[in-house]
Image (cartoon, rainbow, N blue to C red):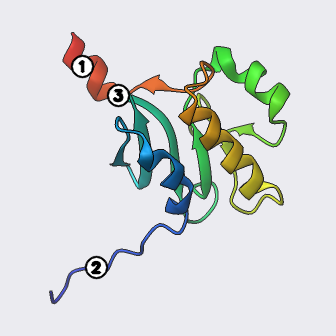
Amino acid sequence: MIGEKLKKKNALLWLFEPLEQDPSFIQRRLFSFDAAYLDGLLYAAVKDGKEPWSGLLVCTSRERHPALLSDFPQLTPHTVLGKWLHISQLHAEFESVAIDLVALALKRDPRLGVESSSRRTRRR
């Protein structure tokens, strides 16, 4: 339509392909990210954009950062959303680390996954 802004497809959605086989998988928009949910928990979000909003966000709690960082030293706390870990799409090891983290999400690694704010609100 005239005047409508064409949305660019997120080039990182391929990361969610292994999750699509899981019956509980849901993909939703989360701000300007595409987010992956399993069993109602938010596990990851991806965005193909400008820094610091480019790459994979690992949805976890601050208490679980040390355990994840010991296995994935390439991750860093996100500069804006510090409660979550991040790997930039520009990082030399982005693909291999992102693939490994998605595989952990599929296995329901207890270091990953958070309740979304909408789910917390509904429970109250």
Q: Viewer-proximal residue, 18 or 38?
A: 18
Q: Viewer-nearest of labels 1 and 3?
A: 3
Amino acid type assigned to the residue bearing label 3 in the image: Gly
Determine which quarter of the picture holds residue 39. Answer: top left
Disc 3 and disc 2: Cα gap in Å? 31 Å
Task: Kindly identify the residue that appears in the image at 28 percent across and 79 percent down.
Answer: 5
Answer whether residue 117 is visible to the viewer in this image: yes
Pointers 3 and 2 in contact (C-beta within 8 Å): no
At x 56%, y 55%, the residue is 15
Q: Which label number is shown at residue 5?
A: 2
Residue drawn at the location 68% of the way across and 60% of the way down: 89
The numbered disc on residue 121 is: 1
The vertical placement of 2 against 81, above or below, is below
| Location of mark 3 (residue) | 40
Horizontal side of residue 87 vs 120, given as left or right: right
Give the x, y percent position of residue 9. 42, 72
The picture places residue 110, in percent across and down from the top left corner, at 59, 18
Query: Dot 2, crowdedness within 10 Å: few (<14), some or many (≥20)?
Result: few
Q: Is residue 35 visible?
A: no
Where does residue 80 sit, x and y in percent of width and height?
59, 41
Outermost bottom residue: 2
Quadrant location of the C terminus? Answer: top left
Left or right? Give the position of 36 relative to 112. left
Alpha carbon distance from label 1 to label 3:
13 Å
Residue type, label 2: Lys
